[in-house]
Structure formats: structure tokens, C-alpha cells
Amino acid sequence: MCLDGCIIAENKTAPVQASAIIETFANSSKFLQDWKDETEELYRDSEDLSELLNDIPDPNDLSITKIFGGGIMSDNCNPANATQTCLEEMIMQIGKARGYTDEEMIIYQCNCSNHARCTVMDKVTTYSGSRLSALLKEGMFYLSFDVVDIV
């Protein structure tokens, strides 16, 4: 399962953002049920009703607990890490309430390797640039330049 999209939370705090993600699953499950109900209402006299209803995913199958055994990937900045941790804690609470065992409730926390690489390389280039500047300034002291007139 991959959750990628725009989830607009009330504010940018980790608990509120994590709650908005959980709420998205609950709302999506409700939308699927509404879709099934509406299809049943519209096509109740159709001989294809059963097939139509089978084509709509089961709303009960859309659960945040399907993440168990998988991972949550996010950016590697502090706010994203905090949201990731809050989300994991909330999913664990939901899992316990639904009767999952501790052995079943495994969630891996993953960081985007591209973001990590950019963070590391930013630090490397900043350090390398300042170190190179210092070396060049030091070396320039020992160099002497003669002005040569080229005719």
C-alpha cells in the first residue's frame, strides 16, 4: 500500500499530521462503502449487480494496520521524523485495540535515501568549500607574482 497525496492537516504538528493520515484511511473506507451502497441502489435490478459490487474493493480491507510488516518512509528532517514516530505509535494503538499481537505489529521506519544523500552531501560540500578556501588563502601568501610584459 502506498499513501501519496495531499493530506491537509489542521496544523503542522506531528500528532495532528499523524491523525490526519489515520483519518484519511477511515474516510477512504467510508467512501468505498458509500460507493458500494450507491452502486447497489443504482443497479439493484441489474443482473450484473454482483459483478459490479465485486469490482469495488472491500472497505474493510482498507486499514492502516496493513502497514504491519512494512515500513513508513519519510523525509529525514526533524518534523518528518516526529510525524513518522507519532504515526507509528497511533498505528500500534489501533493494532492493540484490534487484537494484534506484538509479534504481528512490526513497522519499519525508513528515511528517504535521496534526502539523506542530499543532507550529507550538503555538509560535505560546505566543509570542503571552507577547507579549500582556507588552504588557498594560506597558499596565496607564499606565492609571488611577477608582472611580465608580453610584447
Image (cartoon, rainbow, N blue to C red):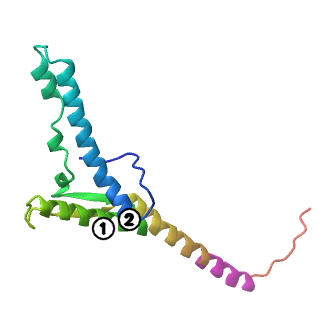
Membership of 23 in magenta stretch:
no
The answer to whether mark 2 and mark 1 are in CB contact below 8 A is: yes
Pick the front one: 71 or 14: 14
Is residue 112 in view?
Answer: no
Q: Is residue 88 above or below residue 35?
A: below
Q: Residue at x 19, y 64 (%)?
A: 92
Q: Which residues are magenta?
A: 131-142
SS for dot 2: helix
Side (left or right) of 48 relative to 140: left
Q: Is residue 57 above or below residue 74?
A: above
Q: Residues within 10 Å of mark 1 (few under 14, many from 20)?
A: some
Membership of 133 in magenta stretch:
yes
Tell me the number on the disc at residue 16.
none
Instruction: Indicate the amino acid at tag 2.
Output: Ala
Q: Residue at x 45, y 69 (%)?
A: 120
According to the image, label 2 marks what residue? 14
Tell me the number on the disc at residue 85.
1
